[in-house]
Amino acid sequence: MTGTTRSSADLDVRRRRVLFRSWHRGIREMDLLMGQFADARIGEMTDAELDIYEALIEVPDRDLFRWLTGEDPVPVNYDTPVFRDLKGFHQHSGPINV
């Protein structure tokens, strides 16, 4: 089970592939971070935003996780509106009820 809550039936081939790759990163924490974001945003991304998101998918889990948690600075070439949207998507101002 992947955890995805979104059907890929209405997506083109490229978006289906990106959605799948978002949920199959390698470590479960990154599956959840990238997969939940993709579930929510994949259908509305422009082709240019999708290009940027695909570049983020290629970043090793360890590096991307450290950027998202603020442990390491984000390299300038990855500090994009798409990255900031991904990071902001997982920011919570209150307790999370699981």
Image: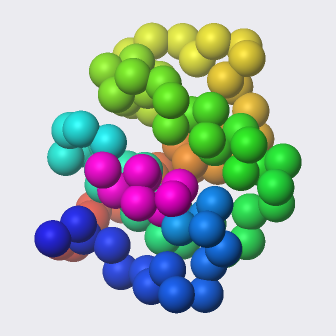
Residue at the spot x=66%, y=74% of the render? 12
How many numbered marks does the figure carry? 0
What segment carries the magenta color? 17-24
- Residue 23 forms part of the magenta stretch: yes
Return the residue nearer the eye: 98 or 35.
35
The percent position of residue 90, horizontal first and vertical second, equals 45, 52
Which is nearer the eye, 13 or 94? 13
The quarter holding residue 70 reads: top left
| Residue drawn at x 15%, y 71% as measured from the top left | 1
Magenta highlight on residue 9? no
Q: Is residue 26 above or below residue 48?
A: above
x and y percent of residue 46 in the render? Answer: 82, 60
Residue 92 shows up from this direction: no
Direction from residue 86 to residue 6 in the image, left or right = left
For the point 50% across and 37% down, the residue is 57
- Say which residue appears at 45% left-offset and 32% top-offset: 68
- Looking at the figure, which quarter contains the C terminus? bottom left
> Where is residue 77 shown, x and y percent of the image?
73, 17
